[in-house]
Amino acid sequence: MAAAEGASRFERGMSAGTAVSRLRRSGVVLLTAGILVAAAVAAVLAPWIAPADPDKVDIANRLRPPGWSQAGGPVRLFGTDQLGRDMLSRVIYGARVSLFVGLMSVFGAGGIGVALGVIAGFHGGRVDDVIMRVLDIQQSVPFLALAIAMVAVLGPGLQNIIIVLWIAGWTLYARIVRGETLSIREKEYVTAARALGTRNARILARHVLPNILSPILVIATFTFSHMIITEATLTFLGLGVQPPTATWGAMLSDGRNYMQVAWWLPTFPGLILVLVVVSANLLGDWIRDVLDPTLRQTL
């Protein structure tokens, strides 16, 4: 009886601990999703919610601290920069560039990587060898170094940045998708479909692609934040989106020269950048746990 009662208490304790863990995890997921949704809404509605023109220069009111308000004018919640431009407006407009680059890079690099990974894994042979050797060569070069070299060749600019991230970012998708495809093509239902004379295109569309969507979604969530960081890094180095376009990387680059006298210049864009990247990573971690059958019991 004592042993049974102890076991029952232990199970109740474990159940309560699991419930608390789920509640905390749900709260984190809601918070991170809320941050990403807020950033997306701000980016889409920037022309309507930004308090001022992000490129309007006002030298007379340069380097004003957060909360400053000119007589009869609006309050500058994030202050002004070295040219008197409203920092809150520039941060809001910067979200448009960062999120656009992140999404376009994920779709482009993901499309290239998934296509090549499926082709390599499904067909095998020389096609697989060629794709994987190209992948190995590219992965031998650090991602950021490759991106910098390509931007130096193509030139700076939003369009070129996206193209560079497509070319530099497809390898992770291709390697993982190839491995998943190699496993799926040996399954009984694929063998049965082949025995019935089903064409390869139909097998890919009906049996292979639906079963590799989960890892693709997880990779896309993680690489989204990576692409945002890469764009900000290249812009910080002067190789990305060029002035006067408001971007978080450019604001960080400009603000580093004024950290002693205007702490808010690098602080606000840097804080927003960190919040968006960390939120995307936490959301990706949650999606991975949900889609992984071996981890569902702990959610």
Image (cartoon, rainbow, N blue to C red):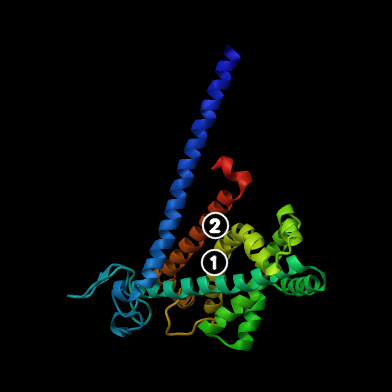
Q: Mark 2 and mark 1 in contact (Cβ < 8 Å)?
A: yes
Instruction: Give residue 158's position: percent from left, percent from top.
Output: 51, 82
Does residue 25 show up? yes
In the rendered view, does 17 fall on the left or right side of 93? right
Q: Residue under label 2, please give it.
A: 284
The numbered mark at residue 224 is 1
Residue drawn 52% across the image and 70% down it: 228
In the rendered view, does 12 fall on the left or right side of 190? left
Q: Residue furthest front?
A: 196
* 202 or 13: nearer the viewer: 202
Of pointers 1 and 2, the one earlier in the residue sequence: 1
SS at circle 2: helix
Does residue 144 show up? no
SS at circle 1: helix
Name the kind of residue labelled 1 in the image.
Phe
> What distance separates the C-alpha of mark 1 from that of mark 2?
10 Å
Q: Residue furthest top?
A: 1
The residue carrying pointer 2 sits among few (fewer than 14), some (14 to 19) or many (20 or more) residues within 10 Å by Cα, namely many
* 212 or 142: nearer the viewer: 212
